[in-house]
Image: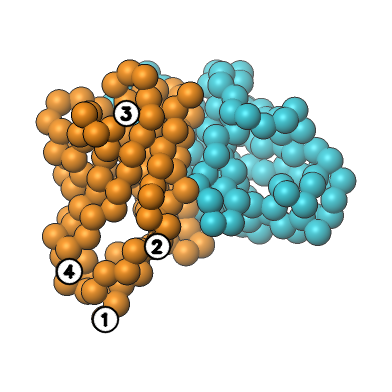
Amino acid sequence: AQSVTQPDIHITVSEGASLELRCNYSYGATPYLFWYVQSPGQGLQLLLKYFSGDTLVQGIKGFEAEFKRSQSSFNLRKPSVHWSDAAEYFCAVGDSGGGADGLTFGKGTHLIIQP
Amino acid sequence: DAGVTQSPTHLIKTRGQQVTLRCSPKSGHDTVSWYQQALGQGPQFIFQYYEEEERQRGNFPDRFSGHQFPNYSSELNVNALLLGDSALYLCASSLRTVSTDTQYFGPGTRLTVL
């Protein structure tokens, strides 16, 4: 069965500093990988996705993620965080990219931005 | 272009009652998935509907059932509510035949079971 691990429950970063959120997955084949963000009281917004091809993917709001098959990782990065980035971040894996399968999510990482 | 909408926003029920949650998919989408998000946890997949049939199901009991209508909207029904059913219920829509499509989420329905 597929699974996703987000090792960091909370991360605190100063505004303007760089950010890396970790995600490890367990999956038998080539996974479809996603990062979503959830602000308080809101639904999930897709930041970026990896299906195939270039292992470095660019997303919205200045985020990027790198797929490393050898490490079973899909870490999310941002070079300079803004106070508005404070939110809950979820990594997810799916069997397909076409929305034809349920996604498996990690437990999330809560990002706190210090002024 | 309206995104995924869900109703109601909040709901309070007591143990043993039944509840129905509703979801309208994003325009042009034909597939609806439901997720349960307990406090402090990631969303967990309940089931997915396509062409008015349940196509895939996660590890949830039969108390959780659903329906999809010809206009692609969907309902999630939960019978015999337990305290542990208190959660944010998220609906996501997608277009099944597009391999590069993704799931777009609604704002959710917050269910509290007392």
- Residue tagged 2: A10
Q: Secondary structure at mark 2?
A: strand
Left or right: B77 in relation to A108: right
Of the residues shown, which amino acid type is indicated by label 4? Ala
- Residue tagged 3: A32
Chain A representation colour = orange
Q: Earlier in the sequence, mark 2 or mark 1?
A: 2
Mark 2 and mark 3, same subunit? Answer: yes
10 Å crowding of disc 2: few (<14), some (14-19), many (20+): few
Q: Position of residue B3 (x, y in %)?
A: 43, 45
10 Å crowding of disc 4: few (<14), some (14-19), many (20+): few
Q: Earlier in the sequence, mark 4 or mark 1?
A: 4
- Residue tagged 4: A17
Q: Quadrant of residue A75?
A: top left
Colouring rule applied to residues: by chain
- Residue tagged 1: A115
Of the residues shown, which amino acid type is indicated by label 2? His
Left or right: B40 in relation to B69: left
Of the residues shown, which amino acid type is indicated by label 1? Pro
Residue B6, relative to residue A26: is it above or below?
Answer: below
Q: Is residue B8 visible?
A: no
* Letter of the chain shown cyan in the rendering: B
Q: Secondary structure at mark 4?
A: loop
Say whether marks 2 and 3 touch (CB < 8 Å).
Answer: no
Q: Position of residue B6 (x, y in %)?
A: 57, 48
Q: Secondary structure at mark 3?
A: strand
Chain bearing mark 3: A
